[in-house]
Image (cartoon, rainbow, N blue to C red):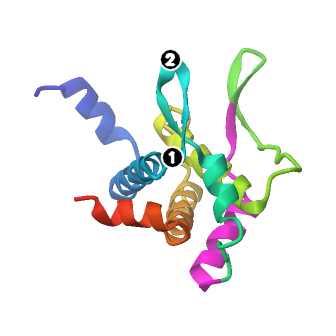
């Protein structure tokens, strides 16, 4: 397949390709496991959408952010320096601080933030990679997803079966 123009564009972007690919893979597999474990709701045009909210509510009691120093650091970073949200202001794209709804638990809010990391990377919001912040957001998101996979037996089993 010949894509010389896009290959050139790709090579000019400054980001950790391995880290971004790993996050993309882990996030995709996690959503696969959520949907197949029953955490699934109808999306647009009858599409299947992972139900992150239900999952977060169900694991809230099992999830202990102080299990390891790495997990504690990841949770603290995400909660205290949350991923920004891309919006349109005055007919211009910009990033703003996310506003946490008061009714959300830390786990529910973390699920919103982790999806925000994914959205910014894969929906064109972060074509300008922010070193060192973006790698930290990605790494911390994966640490949290790793811990969450241990909080639900069905999700864990489905992830273990991936080949």
Residue 158 located within the stretch drawn in magenta: no
Quadrant placement of the C terminus: bottom left
Residue on which disc 1 sits: 129
Q: Which residues are magenta?
A: 67-86
Q: CA distance from mark 2 to mark 1?
A: 33 Å
In-front residue for pair 126/141? 141
**Badge 2 element:** helix
Q: Which residue is mark 2?
A: 45
Estimate how packed mark 1 is, as few (under 14), some (14 to 19) or many (20 or more) residues with alpha carbons within 10 Å.
some
Judge whether 77 appears above or below 89 on screen: below
- Mark 2 packing: few (<14 Cα in 10 Å), some, or many (20+)? few
- Residue ranking furthest to the top: 91
Q: Quadrant of residue 62?
A: bottom right
> Considering only vertical position in the picture, is 77 above or below 83?
below
Whether residue 163 is situated above or below residue 35 in the rendered picture: below
Residue name at image x 52 percent, y 69 percent: 143
Q: Nearer the viewer, mark 2 or mark 1?
A: 2
Residue 114 on image: x %, y % = 59, 52
Number of numbered discs visible in the structure rendering: 2
| SS of the residue under disc 1 | loop
Q: Position of residue 24 (x, y in %)?
A: 40, 49
Please name the residue shown 70% across and 61% down the image: 107
Which residue reaches farthest right? 102
Q: Earlier along the polypeptide chain: callout 2 or callout 1?
A: 2
């Amino acid at each position: 397949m010949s894509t010389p123009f896009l290959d050139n564009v790709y090579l000019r972007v400054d980001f950790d390709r391995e880290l971004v690919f790993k996050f993309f893979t882990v996030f995709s597999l996690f959503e696969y496991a959520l949907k197949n474990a029953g955490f699934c709701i109808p999306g647009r045009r009858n599409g299947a959408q992972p139900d992150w909210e239900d999952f977060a509510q169900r694991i809230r009691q099992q999830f202990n952010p102080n299990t390891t120093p790495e997990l504690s650091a990841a949770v603290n970073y995400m909660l205290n320096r949350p991923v920004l949200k891309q919006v349109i202001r005055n007919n211009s794209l910009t990033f703003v601080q996310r506003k946490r709804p008061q009714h959300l638990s830390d786990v529910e809010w973390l699920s919103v933030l982790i999806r925000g990391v994914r959205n910014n990377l894969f929906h064109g919001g972060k074509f300008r990679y922010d070193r060192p912040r973006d790698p930290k957001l990605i790494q911390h998101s994966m640490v949290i997803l790793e811990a969450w996979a241990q909080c639900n037996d069905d999700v864990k089993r489905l992830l273990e079966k991936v080949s």
